[in-house]
Image (cartoon, rainbow, N blue to C red):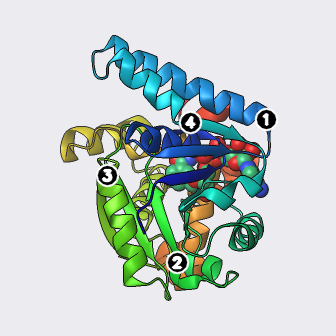
Amino acid sequence: MAIKKVMVIGAGQMGSGIAQVCAQAGFDVLLHDMKEAALDKGISTIEKLLTRAVEKDRISEADKTSTLDRLTKSTNLEDAKSCDLVIEAVVENMDVKTKVFQQLDEITPKHAILASNTSSLPITEIAAVTNRPDQVIGMHFMNPVPVMKLVEIIRGLQTSDATYQAIEKMTNDLNKTPVEVNDFPGFVSNRILMPMINEAIYTVYEGVASPEDVDTVMKLGMNHPMGPLTLADFIGLDTCLYIMEVLYEGFGDSKYRPCPLLRKYVKAGWLGKKTGRGFYQY
Ligand code: NAI
């Protein structure tokens, strides 16, 4: 069954980006959010990004218009009844996600694939609340979605080969590069990235070097485009802590112990760029 119509749930940072790339690739897209205001903000962000792409000659005015024509707002989850694929990008909370998947299992046609953009929650557990665990899969896009080429495709324990292949094709159609990953804490991306960020925080905590110097070492010495502490501030220190907790709990290994300085900053409300203060001030 070919994927033609897609619903993206959650019009936040990730959901609006996913809706944009799907519409640009020619799919009919319903962008759903429970908040009308979030939907309006999501659509206006997409409009701004497309306008900028026209100004930079990356797409034509006609491409922009046809992309926007393929995008429809939805505040009613029942609209998913006409979709071949649903990509969920609501808040990172297991209770909220499982409730959405239970409802989708009731609403969507039997052939529909249900995907989650979760960055850390187990796909196998999300799949288990549905009657179609073989058609549930992780599609982990990177932020910002229109720019980043990677999609980690997460196979839950029961994900079928047919589901994997359909999502692999879809990812290629979006002009992204798929990587096949089995369902383990942190998948590949966060299992490698977050311990590096956590270690960078330890080097500051232990007085080895200042945040600026740690970032300079990784930028100029390792050719990273951005230092790990700057990156942590962009991701959000609360998110970094949450993912370290997932790794620590999931593997039960002390090498994933979140740095006490990370906990302290999060307790202080220093969450990075979004709150104006993290390892740097904004
Ligand atoms: P966000 O907070 O920007 O957006 C979430 C949206 O979901 C909000 O507009 C909210 O109104 C809506 N929402 C919440 N519950 C809902 C429900 N039950 N039904 C419909 N809409 C609902 O969050 P963001 O950053 O876009 O993250 C979304 C997901 O993507 C999370 O699972 C996150 O872990 C994952 N992710 C985030 C990345 C990031 O860099 N922010 C990177 C990769 C994955």
Quarter containing the N terminus: bottom left
Q: Give the amino acid type for the residue marked by disc 3 in the picture.
A: Asp
Q: Is residue 209 above or below residue 60?
A: below
Q: Marks 3 and 4, Cα distance to the nearest angstrom?
A: 17 Å
Residue in the foreground of this view, choosing between 212 and 88: 88
User: Which residue was labeled with disc 4?
Assistant: 71
Residue 261 appearing in the image:
no
Residue at x 32% of width, y 18% of height: 60
User: Which residue was labeled with disc 2?
Assistant: 135
Percent across and percent down for residue 274 are: 64, 34
- Please name which of the two marks, 4 or 1, marks the residue nearer to the observer: 4
Q: Which sits earlier in the primary sequence, circle 3 or circle 1?
A: 1
Residue in the foreground of this view, choosing between 254 and 70: 70
* Label 1 residue SS: helix
Q: Which sits earlier in the primary sequence, circle 4 or circle 2?
A: 4
Residue at x 58% of width, y 83% of height: 133
User: Which residue was labeled with disc 1?
Assistant: 36
> Does ligand 1 reach within 8 Å of label 4's beta carbon?
no
Percent across and percent down for residue 76 are: 78, 49
Residue 205 as seen in the image, left or right of residue 11: left
Q: Is residue 203 above or below residue 61?
A: below
Residue in the foreground of this view, choosing between 267 and 172: 172
Q: Which sits earlier in the primary sequence, circle 3 or circle 4?
A: 4
* Label 4 residue SS: strand
Task: Using the rendered view, name the quadrant where residue 78 is placed.
Answer: bottom right
Label 2, residues with CA under 10 Å away: few <14, some 14-19, many ≥20? many
Label 4, residues with CA under 10 Å away: few <14, some 14-19, many ≥20? many
Q: Give the amino acid type for the residue marked by disc 1 in the picture.
A: Glu
Q: Which sits earlier in the primary sequence, circle 2 or circle 3?
A: 2
Q: Marks 1 and 2, Cα distance to the nearest angstrom?
A: 29 Å
Residue 250 as seen in the image, left or right of residue 49: right
Q: Name the mark on residue 173.
A: 3
